[in-house]
Image (tube, grey):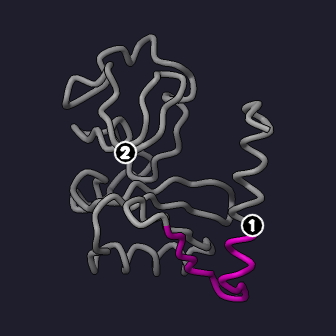
Amino acid sequence: MKCDGCTACCEHLDIPWMDSPSGSLCKECTGSACGVWDTAPLDCKTYNCVYVQQDRAPIELRPDLCGVIFEKLSHNLMFGLMFKRQIPDLIIEQIKNFNHQGYSVVIDVMHDKKLFAFPKEGKTENMVLTMFRAHQNKLEVVNGSC
């Protein structure tokens, strides 16, 4: 599946390599797609958007329509950046599906700067948030931010 007209990541993710802060549309976005996809940085091309990875995801889960961009961080952790103020019932069901599939989920409510953990069975919220922060720290070291 392709992005299907969704440009949520182009607007709501911090894209430092494109000089595009979170909340502002990337200068390379046409409004319905990336204008430089063929030559886009590898970080853009390898972003793990869960919607794009699904063959039969319902259109309602497209990030620009549901208000959450889900990213697979590891074999047992999903991250969702929520850019709308309320979590729709569809997203709650999707989080439950991820939990059932063996993933814990962390949701970042970008307007409120809050993290919420939805642990899979056998994990606690604290364990999930610790795992998420460890993942973030690892990325900062790899990207030279530390």
Q: Against 11, is 58 above or below?
A: below
Q: Against 59, is 43 above or below?
A: above
Dot 1 or dot 2: first in sequence order is 2
Closer to us: 60 or 116: 116
Three-letter amino acid code at the position of disc 2: His
Is 90 displayed left or right of 140 in the figure?
A: left
Instruction: Please state the total of marks drawn on the protein image.
Output: 2
Q: Bin the neighbour count of mark 2 within 10 Å (Cα to Cα): few under 14, some 14-19, many 20 and up.
A: many
Residue for badge 1: 131
Say the numbered circle drawn on residue 34.
none
Of discs 1 and 2, which sits in the foreground? 2
Residue for badge 2: 12
Q: In percent of the image, x 75 and y 78: which residue is there?
A: 127
Q: In percent of the image, x 66 and y 87: which residue is there?
A: 121
Q: Position of residue 53 (x, y in %)?
A: 45, 47
Q: Bin the neighbour count of mark 1 within 10 Å (Cα to Cα): few under 14, some 14-19, many 20 and up.
A: some
Q: In percent of the image, x 37 and y 80: which residue is there?
A: 93
Q: Against 136, is 21 above or below?
A: above
Label 1 and label 2: CA atoms lie apart by 23 Å
Q: Position of residue 92 (x, y in %)?
A: 37, 79
Label 1 residue SS? helix
Q: Is residue 17 magenta?
A: no
Three-letter amino acid code at the position of disc 1: Met
Which quadrant of the rendered structure holds the C terminus? top right
Among the 4 quarters of the image, the one containing residue 72: bottom right
Q: Position of residue 57 (x, y in %)?
A: 32, 58
Label 2 residue SS? helix
Find the magenta span and give its range: 114-130
Q: In percent of the image, x 33 and y 58: which residue is there?
A: 83
| View extreme (top): residue | 39
Closer to us: 49 or 11: 11
